[in-house]
Amino acid sequence: MKKKLVVLTGAGMSAESGLRTFRDSDGLWEEHDVMEVASIEGWHRNPKLVIEFYNQRRRQLATVSPNRGHVVLAELERDFDVQIVTQNVDDLHERAGSTNIVHLHGELTKIRSVDGATVIDIGYGDLTPEQTDDRGVPLRPHIVWFGEAVPLIEMADRLVREADIFAVIGTSLVVYPAAGLVNSMRPGTPAFLIDPGEVGMRLPSNFTVIREGAGSGVEKMRDRLSAYVVR
């Protein structure tokens, strides 16, 4: 039976594909204050601004491709039961070929009714402020914003607790509750951190740290994972 490899990915995973992160830009995301476009308060203040912001993000997403890091993670499914828990709202893991993905913070290519009952795949198209679902309920981006609960965190926690191997890629481990998943590992679980920068917590001693970007870092991790392949 394949060993279970659980991978937590953050914004640095997609940065090499050309998608910007707000944490690398002094709280700005594509020149917007992040709390204006990624918080429930921002939505209530100016839904038209938020809708247009995510329309622009979808258009941008349509122009980029998965990077080498995404592709190698998908390839690892040949030898491991790979479960990806991502803080990213893009679809680059899917497009690279990964098949088991938990999107903690929602999905950019989907919209939902404001009451959460309807979820619609919009692809890379636009949402308009006037759009509603079949019941007449207004629609919003299918994104988990600051100030909202993270519905899939319990599923992610269970996956990390079951992991035979755990990896953290491209995240500074400062956004909770996702950062707290590091504490859900079973003691002694082999673990990897791939990120060129410093992280926001002291890591347990079972972590192997690879101070590189996603592409080269995931390839180096793959080399080290060969010792864990069940033949």
Image: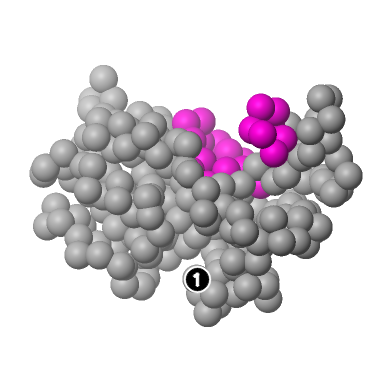
Image check: 141 left or right of 95? right
Front one among 185 and 100:
185
Q: Can residue 21 be seen in this view?
A: yes
Question: Which residue: 86% across, 40% down?
Answer: 131
Residue 10 belongs to magenta span: no
Image check: 65 left or right of 139? left
Q: Can residue 74 be seen in this view?
A: no
Question: Which residue: 34% across, 54% down?
Answer: 179
Residue 109 belongs to magenta span: yes
Total number of numbered labels?
A: 1
Q: Hey, what amino acid is under mark 1? A: Arg
Quarter of the figure with the C terminus: top left
Question: Which residue: 83% across, 35% down?
Answer: 132
Image check: 78 left or right of 128? left
Image vertical order of residue 100 relative to residue 127, above or below: above
x, y percent for residue 141: 70, 46
Residue 173 figure quarter: bottom left
Front one among 52 and 84:
52
Front one among 135 and 153:
135
Front one among 22 and 139:
139
Image vertical order of residue 58 relative to residue 150, above or below: below
Quarter of the figure with the N terminus: top left
Residue 32 figure quarter: bottom right
x, y percent for residue 6: 33, 39
x, y percent for residue 55: 78, 54
x, y percent for residue 4: 29, 31
Q: Mark 1 sits on what residue?
A: 23
Residue 25 figure quarter: bottom right
Question: Which residue: 82% across, 46% down?
Answer: 127
| Region of the chain picked out in magenta, as a range | 92-119
Tag 1's secondary structure?
helix
